[in-house]
Image (cartoon, helix red, strand yellow):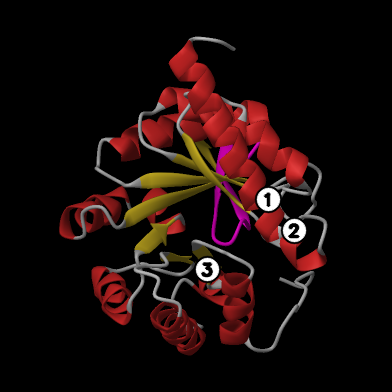
Amino acid sequence: MEQATVFSEDPAEMALHWLRQGARRLHLVDLNGAFAGKPKNEAAVKAILKAVASFAEENDVEEIPVQLGGGIRDLDTIERYLDDGLSYIIIGTAAVKNPGFLHDACSAFPGQIIVGLDAKDGKVATDGWSKLSGHEVVDLAQKFEGYGCEAIVYTDIGRDGMMGGVNIEATVRLAQAVTIPIIASGGVHHVGDVEALCRVEDEGIEAVICGRSIYEGTLDLRSGQDRADELTRELEANRLSGSK
């Protein structure tokens, strides 16, 4: 927390900035909430959702999914956030410490619960990364898949914010171990990292979260998405033709 960088004092305006750049999905983290164990930025989240809804209406866009994690520990909070307009809720620390809560959430809100697994050296971290558990990432992912979660956001916390490249090996290993989609996070620096993930065929890696790289300009959001689309079409064509 003491090393956090403030890029904007207006989260809603920043969300609009990325939407204007072509963002198709927004990933939000209540960073204070992750440390406090309860929501701390609901007003900012609501402002973002209002801005997203207005943008979608003005541009005749059917839906722009928004997902949120950080400090979510009970079903009432999930219901409130979903009623506000969030598409997905990310449960991280609470999933590890209270698996029964995650199971209940998946049952109560099917298709809208994503598990966030933050890890270092294969071990899952909790409480805003401040505590390292003894749980193996793959073991928990397989367990939570059985609960019915929609996807897993996998973050290598040793790389997140460092822009030193995505941990492809660990991400692929996790994707191979489960059948639900994996959303890669942590370490994205430039378009080459996006390309590397896109080239991993048939491993269930659905998307990559880009944070600091787009804020600092080492990755252009629009060109990154265009390149991902291009590679996806290329891989699909190769798959259909049977070539590599």
Residue type (three-letter) at the residue carrying disc 2: Asp
Q: CA distance from mark 1 to mark 3?
A: 19 Å
Picture coordinates of residue 3, whole percent (x, y)? 79, 69
Residue ID for mark 3: 28
Q: Looking at the image, which is closer to me, 57 or 48?
A: 57
Q: CA distance from mark 2 to mark 1?
A: 6 Å
- On screen, 41 above or below 217? below
Residue ID for mark 2: 220
Q: Secondary structure at mark 1?
A: helix
- On screen, 153 above or below 12? above
Left of 140 or right of it: where is 9?
A: right
Give the magenta part as a residue range.
Answer: 119-132
Which residue is located at x 40 percent, y 71 percent? 61
Q: Earlier in the sequence, mark 1 or mark 3?
A: 3
Q: Earlier in the sequence, mark 2 or mark 3?
A: 3
Determine crowd level at label 3: few under 14, some 14-19, many 20+ residues with C-alpha closer than 10 A.
Answer: some
- On screen, 36 above or below 220? below
Residue ID for mark 1: 224
Which residue is located at x 31 percent, y 49 percent? 99
